[in-house]
Image (tube, grey):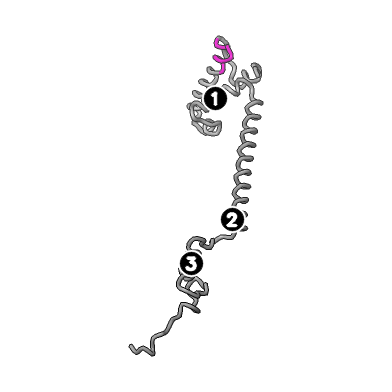
Amino acid sequence: MRIAAMPIYSSQDTHGATGVSRTSGKSDFSALLDEKSNPRSFISEEDLEARKNEHEARQKAEKSAARADVISQFLDYSEMTFAERIRAAWLSDHDLTEEQLAALPDDQRKAIEDEIEEAVKRQLGLEGASGGTSAEIAVDGDHR
């Protein structure tokens, strides 16, 4: 290669990859260090703050919804009769919901209903009582 064909670089007036004008070897190195120690953010401060606010608002809404659900469940429970509470507890203890119970075949559902009725009678102190369904006990034996 001929010397005349080679480009000549001067450290006094060239711009490097950082776009910082270099006037000496020392300032080139300093500019590079400054850029490495203070990298430019890919997200602006305003965007970061907006994301933070959105996240906080979402968390607040989720807490509010959870609280409303707990309050709703408490109010539903507080409006139940004692027999309904016993029934709900029995179903919960046996990992059943009212919907699942209703979907069971008649013979299975009847057997479970009989067990629930006996549990209600036991807890209400009506063990010697004959007849009457848990629904009748719930109406007649309203022990809130």
> Relative to 54, does residue 70 appear above or below in the rendering?
above
**Percent position of residue 51, x then y:** 59, 53
Amino acid on which the number 1 mark rests in the picture: Ala
Residue nearest the viewer, comparing 10 with 61: 10
- Which mark identifies residue 109? none
Residues marked 3 and 2 touching at CB (< 8 Å)? no
Mark 1, residue position: 89
Report how far apart the C-alphas of labels 1 and 2 lie in the structure. Answer: 48 Å
Amino acid on which the number 2 mark rests in the picture: Leu
Amino acid on which the number 3 mark rests in the picture: Ser
Report how far apart the C-alphas of labels 1 and 3 lie in the structure. Answer: 73 Å
> Relative to 10, does residue 87 appear above or below in the rendering?
above
Q: Earlier in the sequence, mark 3 or mark 2?
A: 3
Q: Earlier in the sequence, mark 1 or mark 2?
A: 2
Residue 44 located within the stretch drawn in magenta:
no
Mark 2 surroundings: few (<14), some (14-19) or many (≥20) residues within 10 A = few
What secondary structure characterizes most of the magenta part? helix
> Relative to 17, does residue 64 appear above or below in the rendering?
above
Which residue appears at 48% of the width and 67% of the height? 30
Given this view, does label 1 or label 3 mark the residue nearer the observer? 3
Tell me which segment is drawn in magenta.
120-127
**Percent position of residue 56, x then y:** 61, 47
> Relative to 83, does residue 96 appear above or below in the rendering?
below
